[in-house]
Amino acid sequence: MSVSTPALRDERAVRPGSRRKVADRYADRLLYAICLAAAILTGVTIVAVGYEVVHGALPAISKYGFGFLTSTIWLPNFGEFGAASLIFGTAVTSFFALLLGAPIAIAIGLFLSLLAPAGVRTIVSPLVELLAAIPSVILGFWGILVLAPFVQSNVEPFLHDNFGFLPIFGEPQTTGASVFTASLILTIMVIPIIASITRDLFTSVPRDLQDGASALGATRWEVVRGVVLPTTASGVVAASILGLGRALGEAIAVAQIIGAGSKINASLFETGDTLAARIANQMPGALTELHIASLYYLGVILLVIGLATNLLAQWIGRRFGYGGAVAR
Amino acid sequence: MSDAFDPAAPLTSSGNLRRRQLFSRLAMSGATAAAVAAVAVLVIVIYTVVARGASAINLDFIFKAAPAGVAPELIGTAIIVAMATAIAMPIGVLVALFVTEYAGRRATHLVKLTLDLINGLPSIIIGIFIFGLMVKGNKQSGIAGAVALAIIEVPLIARGTQEVLHLVPKNLREAADALGVARWRAMLTVVLPSAIGGILTATVLSVARAAGETAPLILVCSVFDPGSFSFNPFEAIPNVPVRIYGLSEEANPSGFTEAWGLSLLLISFILFASLGARALFARSKRKMSS
């Protein structure tokens, strides 16, 4: 190239083996090495997290083995630990959060992608995402002081009076701190996650398909039911699983509001506890080695569940197409 | 629809279409109601925080230490988040550069998967990780808190940077290549500067996320004295989320007022940062495409 530009004075730039060229080569390699190191560091981090958590749990693992998972006894003062009631609490709160949250979130995704006029969309879309930006500690604090009293004095009596024949709607307790209230807070947390992913999914459904259905006389709902949802079903499932992962792992807001009970109750209106909330509650004050190790054991369970849901969501998203918005 | 075609059927409407349209309209109003409900929850939460927190806030509250104010927590959170961002931003940007500029298909897939997994880790897990790594057998420290928050920030920054690096026009790179600019120089002086808007957006969003993150800090940076200005990074530094959490666990009405005030300050910072980042991103995107 320099041959064709005789005006180029700076010959150092073109002579092979010149200092500049050598420096460039080293700088290129250096930048590559730094970038590679950063990428490797992220991989090392995830491995180190796994190692450290399992390592911390070893005393409890060697003492209890898998029996830890089925024992409901958690008595730090007597050195007895078991995770069953916490696994139960985690499953119940996340299940109800998803049961309530996923349909609402999918409806919001439909509204934002197919129904709302452009003006409304540009306002509502960021607002829904802001819901995800509220720190969990504030949401939990709001939950204790505002939501819990309301739920305790209005929602729980209503459900108990009308649907009391179901054991899950038992007698309301004196404070609003309950599995039910925790599920409601988790619902608020999973909605923006699922809503923003499904919105992107629904927007990506080819316009032609929808127009085709409309031309055949389908109503708007029939377009959604017959075209939009079937083409994005796997993505919607993946989005819901991501939301589930968020609900499973939430520690602070749940710790504030679930009431830290240690029993398995059929009624949602009793107190309970989850894996993550128990760690947040007791780790700062844990004194004995076994107590700390047991809390780490809870962490191992949580980590396994968390990684599994995350990988499952990715796999479904990629495997069945339309994963772009989820995997990204 | 499944009925066989009957040529003798009368041509009057059966009411079927009306029913279908009614159902459709019901379903669509349900979707609208869901969106309204979500916005309503947001408004109610923010309204409560503003209504109950505003009375707590005055000059003493912002500039003095406990019991009158919360200045140490505010400064402490700023320090921890600044340290976390100083760690996370270079790493995040470098990872994004690696993915977009160097990595092959497999490496890209692997790095993205890793970032997604880190992003999906419950923050309490990051808390016990750092607790085991830096605090157990040692003591709580601001640095431990910063590292924990950095782990939360890296995937956010890397992902945002990656997206905007993909948007950098190809002809910019080609022009740099054609001028014989070395690759490292092109990346540092052409590619990164044109992506700076997006990188800053991602960073601001990650700062907003880290500022409210409580779970890891409870384990690694929570035993502090809210009454004194001491910001030794090798000891626990006062910070806002842990203080709100602590106050919310005590049944003490005056503590609640302080917690509402802190919540108001924190939530307004986060909302402004998120909205600002959005505006910034919209602007830089417009600039890049024009």
Image: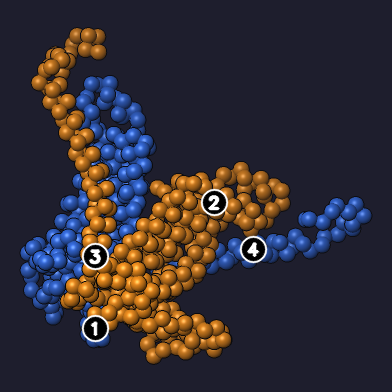
Chain colours: A orange, B blue
Residue drawn at x 22%, y 68% as measured from the top left:
A59
Q: CA distance from mark 3 to mark 1?
A: 19 Å
Residue drawn at x 31%, y 29% as measured from the top left:
B172
Residue drawn at x 56%, y 57% as measured from the top left:
A115
Q: Residues within 10 Å of mark 4 (few under 14, many from 20)?
A: some
All told, the count of numbered labels is 4
Query: Is A14 left, or right, of B47 in this rendering?
Result: left
Q: Are the residues tagged 1 and 4 within 8 Å (C-beta)?
A: no
For the residue labelled by badge 3, is the local secondary structure a helix, a strand or a loop? helix
Residue A106 x %, y %? 51, 60
> Where residue A232 is drawn, which disc sits there?
2
Q: Is residue A309 above or below residue A25?
A: below
Q: Nearer the viewer, mark 2 or mark 1?
A: 1
Residue that label 4 marks: B25
Q: CA distance from mark 1 to mark 4?
A: 60 Å
Q: Amino acid at mark 3?
A: Leu
Residue that label 3 marks: A58
The lab-note entry on whether marks 2 and 1 share a chain reads: yes
Toward the viewer: B254 or B272?
B254
